[in-house]
Amino acid sequence: MSVSTLDSGMNFSMGAATELKEECWSFLRRFFMEDSQKETRFFPVSISVFNRRLKDAMEVEYVLDGKGNPVLDTKTGEPVISSIDTMYLSNYVQIYIFPLTENKAAKVTDLVTSTTKLALNNKDICEVVKNSVRGFYDGSLSLEEAAAAAQIAVTEYLSFDDLIYNSEPLKEGDNQVG
C-alpha cells in the first residue's frame, strides 16, 4: 500500500467559481477521513486518531538484543526504553515519541486542544534573526547581546514591513516630509 503525504503547513481552499466542486470536495473529504489520518506522519486532525496515537505512545517497549532480551543501560542497569513512533510537526521538525506518563499525555492533549492559531515560519524573519546573532557564534556577542540584537532587528523589520504594507495613502493636508 502506498501512502501520499501532504505538508501540515498546506492550506486548502476551493474557488467559488470552480467547475470541479465535486472533485474538490471528494479530495478534501478523502484527506480528512480517518483512514487517511491514520497514515499521516504529521499530527492528525482527527481527534480519534490523535487519541489512539496518544494511547499507543503510553505503551512501554524496550530495545531488544539479537536474542530478544531487553538491552540494559550501562549506567543504571535498567532496560533501555525504545521510541514508540516518530511524528513530524513540519518537514523540518521530527519528534521521537517515547512512552508517556498519564500526566504528560494530559499535558499534550491540553496543548493540542487549546491551540487556536497556526504558526507559520517567515523565512525573511528567520534570515533577519540569523544575521543579527552572527556575533554570538563568532564570540563577539554574549547570549544576552545576541538576543537583544535579534529583538531589535525583528522589531525594525516588522515596523518597516508595516510601513510598506499597512500604511494608508497620504491625503491632502497630511503632514508630509520634504
Image: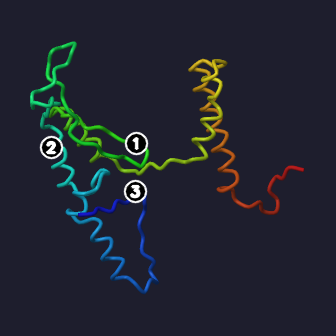
Closest to the observer, 88 or 132:
88
- Dot 2, how many residues are within 10 Å of its Cα: few (below 14), some (14-19), or many (20+)? some
Identify the residue under disc 2.
56
Residue 106, image x, y percentages: 19, 38
Closest to the observer, 155 or 50:
50
**Mark closer to the chain start, 3 or 1:** 3
Query: Is 79 on the left-hand or right-hand side of 166?
Result: left
Query: Is 47 on the left-hand or right-hand side of 145?
Result: left
Q: Which mark is residue 93?
A: 1
Q: Quadrant of the N terminus?
A: bottom left
Residue at 40 percent across and 42 percent down: it is 93
**Mark closer to the chain start, 2 or 1:** 2
Residue 145, image x, y percentages: 62, 21
Amino acid type, callout 3? Asp
Under circle 2, the secondary element is helix
Amino acid type, callout 1? Val
**Mark closer to the chain start, 3 or 2:** 3
